[in-house]
Image (cartoon, rainbow, N blue to C red):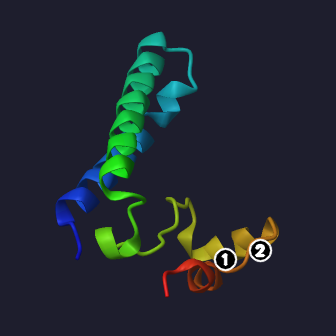
Amino acid sequence: MVDEALARELIDMTDGDRRLQAGALGDDLSAQLTHRRVTTRNGDRLAAILDEYGWPTAELVDGAPLPWPCRDPGRMDELRAEVGLDPFAVYVAKHAPA
């Protein structure tokens, strides 16, 4: 059974972290602290999710493997090959739930 609310929460947590990552690496101490607060909050929440549900499987959150944002998605497989990774479709086939 898919838990749509949990799926949305996990996506929102990821999106919030991604939005703040650049600031975490800069010289702005306020941005660094903001990122640290979000990652701490997300870590605490993920621990609670794991305690309640176990690992959020694809069946629980209707998940499918998705690539992280790519600056040049048209060249994603080419870029993956340059660093020794399989094409994304092959990766998905290997790691998708049966």
Tell me residue 52's x, y (percent).
30, 51
Tell me residue 18's x, y (percent).
44, 43
Disc 1 residue type (three-letter): Asp
Tell me residue 62's x, y (percent).
31, 74
* 19 lies above or below 31: below
* 43 lies above or below 37: below
In the image, what residue occupies the spot 25% across and 51% down?
9
In the image, what residue occupies the spot 71% across and 68% down?
79
Residue bearing the label numbered 2: 81
**Which image quadrant for residue 42?**
top left
Disc 2 residue type (three-letter): Ala
User: Callout 2: 10 Å neighbours few (<14), some, many (20+)?
Assistant: few
Do callouts 1 and 2 mark residues in contact (Cβ within 8 Å)?
Answer: yes
* 98 lies above or below 39: below
Question: In the image shown, does 49 or 4 lie closer to the viewer?
Answer: 49
User: Callout 1: 10 Å neighbours few (<14), some, many (20+)?
Assistant: some
Q: CA distance from mark 1 to mark 2?
A: 6 Å
Q: Secondary structure at mark 2?
A: helix
| Residue 15 seen by the camera | no
| Residue 11 seen by the camera | yes
In the image, what residue occupies the spot 58% across and 86% down?
93
Label placed on residue 77: 1
Q: How many marks?
A: 2
Residue that extends furthest to the top in the rendered view of this protein: 29
In the image, what residue occupies the spot 49% across and 59% down?
69
